[in-house]
C-alpha cells in the first residue's frame, strides 16, 4: 500500500522554491549574471512542480483510501457473547464519587461485546453508544463508563452490609478500547454496563436486540443491530463470554449507608441545576 508523503516535505519544497524564486533569481539578476538567473528560475520551477505533483498524489491516495473503505463495508465486526438483566436497583452496583459524596449506580443490563477491526490499517474504537429494542422502540441506554472498574459490587441476599467486590479492570470493554490500537483482524472483548432510564425501573424489560453505533479513529462510523442471546431471568448468568474476577472475602464492603443514585440521574441533576 502506497503511503502519502509527509507535510514537512511539502513545506520544505515550497521553502526551497521560494528561496530560488525570490532570493537567488533577484540576486543574480542584480549582479548581471543572467545564466545563473535562468538556472535559479529553472530550479524554482522544478521544486514547484515537484511539490504540486506530490500534493496531487497525496489527494489521490486519500480518495482511493476513502473509496476502498466504503467498498469494504463496516469497519468492525461486532458480536455480543453474554447478556445479564437486573431488576432495579439490582444485584450488581457500581460505587462512584459525585459531588454529594459516595453513591451507588445500579447496573440494569450488562453485556460482553467483541469488536474486530476489519480494516487493513490499525484503528482504535473512538466512541460508541447503545440503544435497546424495547416494546417496539429504540431506547438509549446510559453507559456507566466506570472510571474505577474495581468498584463493582454484588449484593447477595439483598445484604448491603456484606457486598462482594468484583474487579473488571482486566475485562472492561471501555478500558480495552481506550488502551488498545487494533491491528487488522485483531479484536477486543469486554463487559459493558448500562443503566435503566427512569421509565424502565419498575419492571425488568424484555430486550431482544441492541443497536450499536460505533466509530473508529479514522472517523468511520457504523450502526449494527445485534440479536441478543436468549433472555435470562433477572440475575441469571451465562458467563461463557466474560469472566468475573471476584475479590477475596476479606474485601467485602458495607454499602448500607451509601445512597443509591444512577449516574445518569446525577448528570441530569447537574444539567438542570439541582446540584451545584
Image (cartoon, rainbow, N blue to C red):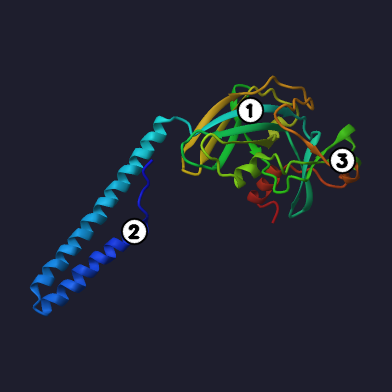
Inter-mark Cα distance, 3 to 2 = 60 Å
Inter-mark Cα distance, 3 to 1 = 28 Å
Question: Residue 134 at x, y = what percent?
Answer: 64, 25
Q: Which residue in the structure is indicated by mark 3?
A: 163
Which quadrant of the figure has residue 34?
bottom left
In primary-sequence order, the first of circles 3 and 2 is 2
Question: Residue 60 at x, y = what percent?
Answer: 30, 43
Residue at 19% from the left image edge and 73% from the top image edge: 24
Inter-mark Cα distance, 2 to 1 = 45 Å
Callout 2–callout 1 Cβ contact below 8 Å = no
Q: Residues within 10 Å of mark 1 (few under 14, many from 20)?
A: some
Task: Tell me the SS state at disc 2.
Answer: helix
Q: How crowded is mark 2: few (under 14 residues within 10 Å), some or many (20 or more)?
A: few
Q: In this view, does 112 lie above or below 253?
A: above
User: Between 64 and 205, which is closer to the camera in this rendering?
Assistant: 64
Q: Which residue in the structure is indicated by mark 1?
A: 80
In primary-sequence order, the first of circles 2 and 1 is 2
Callout 3–callout 2 Cβ contact below 8 Å = no
Q: Which residue in the structure is indicated by mark 2?
A: 9
Which quadrant of the figure has residue 9?
bottom left
Task: Tell me the SS state at disc 1.
Answer: strand
In primary-sequence order, the first of circles 3 and 1 is 1
The answer to whether residue 144 is left or right of residue 56 is right
User: Between 209 and 29, which is closer to the camera in this rendering?
Assistant: 29
Q: Quadrant of the N terminus?
A: top left
Q: Is residue 50 above or below residue 81?
A: below
Nearest-to-viewer mark from 3 and 2: 2
Q: Residues within 10 Å of mark 3 (few under 14, many from 20)?
A: many
Amino acid at each position: 500500500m502506497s503511503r502519502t508523503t509527509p507535510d514537512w516535505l511539502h513545506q520544505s519544497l515550497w521553502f526551497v522554491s521560494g528561496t530560488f524564486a525570490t532570493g537567488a533569481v533577484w540576486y543574480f539578476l542584480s549582479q548581471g549574471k543572467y545564466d545563473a538567473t535562468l538556472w535559479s528560475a529553472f530550479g524554482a520551477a522544478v521544486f514547484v512542480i515537484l511539490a504540486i505533483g506530490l500534493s496531487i498524489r497525496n489527494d489521490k491516495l486519500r480518495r482511493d483510501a476513502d473509496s476502498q473503505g466504503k467498498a469494504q463495508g463496516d469497519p468492525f465486526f461486532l458480536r455480543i457473547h453474554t447478556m445479564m438483566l437486573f431488576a432495579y436497583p439490582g444485584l450488581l452496583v457500581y460505587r462512584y464519587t459525585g459531588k454529594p459524596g459516595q453513591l451507588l449506580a445500579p447496573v440494569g443490563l450488562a453485556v460482553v461485546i467483541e469488536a474486530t477491526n476489519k480494516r487493513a490499517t490499525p484503528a482504535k474504537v473512538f466512541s460508541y453508544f447503545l440503544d435497546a429494542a424495547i416494546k417496539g422502540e429504540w431506547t438509549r441506554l446510559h453507559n456507566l463508563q466506570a472510571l474505577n472498574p474495581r468498584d463493582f459490587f454484588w449484593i447477595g441476599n439483598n445484604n448491603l452490609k456484606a457486598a462482594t467486590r468484583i474487579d473488571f479492570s482486566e475485562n472492561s470493554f471501555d478500558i480495552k478500547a481506550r488502551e488498545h490500537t487494533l491491528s487488522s483482524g485483531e479484536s477486543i472483548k469486554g463487559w459493558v454496563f448500562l443503566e435503566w432510564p427512569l421509565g424502565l425501573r419498575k419492571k425488568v424489560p424484555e430486550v431482544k436486540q441492541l443497536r450499536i453505533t460505533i466509530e473508529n479513529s479514522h472517523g468511520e462510523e457504523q450502526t449494527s443491530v445485534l440479536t441478543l442471546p436468549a433472555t435470562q431471568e433477572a440475575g441469571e448468568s451465562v458467563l461463557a463470554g466474560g469472566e468475573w474476577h471476584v475479590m477475596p472475602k476479606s474485601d467485602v464492603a458495607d454499602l448500607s449507608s451509601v445512597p443509591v443514585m444512577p449516574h445518569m440521574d446525577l448528570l441530569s441533576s447537574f444539567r438542570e441545576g439541582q446540584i451545584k
